[in-house]
Image: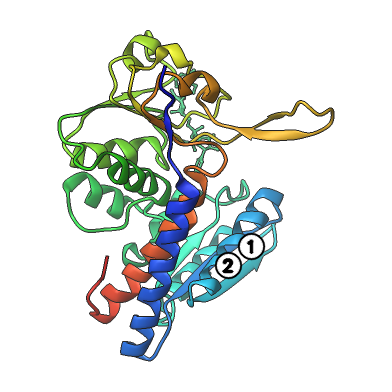
Amino acid sequence: MSQAAIIDGAGFAAGLRARVAEGVTAFRERTGRAPGLAVVLVGEDPASQVYVRSKGKATAEAGMVSIEHKLPADTSQDELLTLVRALNADPAVDGILVQLPLPPQIDENAVIATIDPDKDVDGFNPVNVGRLASGLHGFVPCTPLGCLMLLKDRLGDLSGLDAVVVGRSNIVGKPMAQLLLRESCTVTIAHSRTRDLPAVIGRADIVVAAVGRPRMIKGDWLKPGATVIDVGINRVPADEPGKTRLVGDVAFDEALSVAGAITPVPKGVGPMTIAVLLRNTLVSACRRDGVPISD
Ligand code: NDP
């Protein structure tokens, strides 16, 4: 039996980051300034601290200016909104990202809605959600856009393919479904109330798994030859006592003998998120300064 191709998300992301860095150099030569990404972290959640550090490092490596704001865990909503408004007004800031989750005294939706939609490089502001749904230019959330890039790189034209997105979060599942619809796929969104998930998945040429349950999607649920994008990041005990490792939402070893292609976890979708964030920031800077955007 043939084995699925492994989709090299890490390699694709490295290529995208290199292209963004070239675009940044051209932008600087033309405008005399570097694109700026402001990242706001409230509190000391360890995972969020790691994400913010790696975003700052990647931003600087791409030749952009990284502006980090670290606020204490007891920051009030008004204080955070005041900072977001100042970043909206700051001409050196092209992208604004407020790291989620936020402490309980702050309403995430109020913060997301306050970010200028034209600097909302995460694509979570309802204006950008509406633009995506209406087929207008805006910012698309980084993880699903990264998944789409991997799918198009692998499959080319997606039109007419049956796609199942498992998960309906605002961050991954819903925008992923919108993007696949935009590519003229026939899209099904599955979630925790879906009846007979194996049968739904069994019809799909494309499966995007964004659930957060380790190895939930079994190999024998898949249609032979399907392309599988595994967004899940789940930490499970490793074989070695006391150690852990990351696995996806798909039973990878089983899927290998059924799927046509599959992203691994780690080194699949994960590295795409930051690469797309950098790309969105460069696109924002180009739009704001009227510079043509190269691919
Ligand atoms: P959420 O918890 O917000 O959403 C999970 C979705 O899965 C929900 O829509 C839920 O359905 C659905 N679900 C839960 N259980 C089942 C089930 N048994 N059958 C079918 N559907 C089910 O997660 P996110 O979308 O934020 O993230 C999903 C995964 O992707 C996580 O592992 C996360 O770590 C990872 N992730 C990875 C990123 C990256 O690679 N850079 C970025 C973002 C996320 P319902 O709505 O009915 O509750």
Quadrant of the image for the C terminus?
A: bottom left
Residue at disc 1, CB closer than 8 Å to ligand 1 = no
Q: Amino acid at mark 2?
A: Gly
Quadrant of the image for the N terminus?
A: top left
Local crowd size for mark 1, using a 10 Å CA cut-off: few (<14), some (14–19), many (≥20): some
On the question of residue 177 being in view, the answer is yes
Return the x and y of residue 28 as percentages of the image width and height: 38, 85
- Label 1, on which residue? 53
Residue at disc 2, CB closer than 8 Å to ligand 1 = no
50 displayed left or right of 288:
right
- Label 2, on which residue? 56
Q: Amino acid at mark 1?
A: Arg
Residue 144: quarter of image: top left
Return the x and y of residue 126 as percentages of the image width and height: 32, 50
Q: Which is nearer the eye, 155 or 93?
A: 155
**Picture residue at 48% right of the left edge, 15% below the top:** 218
Q: Is residue 59 above or below residue 252?
A: below
Query: Which SS class for mark 1?
Result: helix
Name of the residue lying farthest toward the front? 1
On the question of residue 277 being in view, the answer is no
Q: Is residue 94 above or below residue 113?
A: below
**Picture residue at 25% right of the left edge, 79% below the top:** 291
Question: Disc 1 and disc 2: Cα gap in Å?
Answer: 5 Å
Return the x and y of residue 83 as percentages of the image width and height: 52, 70
**Picture residue at 33% right of the left edge, 16% below the top:** 223
Q: Is residue 158 above or below residue 83?
A: above
228 displayed left or right of 265:
left
Residues tagged 1 and 2 counted as in contact (Cβ below 8 A): yes
Query: Which SS class for mark 2?
Result: helix
Local crowd size for mark 2, using a 10 Å CA cut-off: few (<14), some (14–19), many (≥20): many
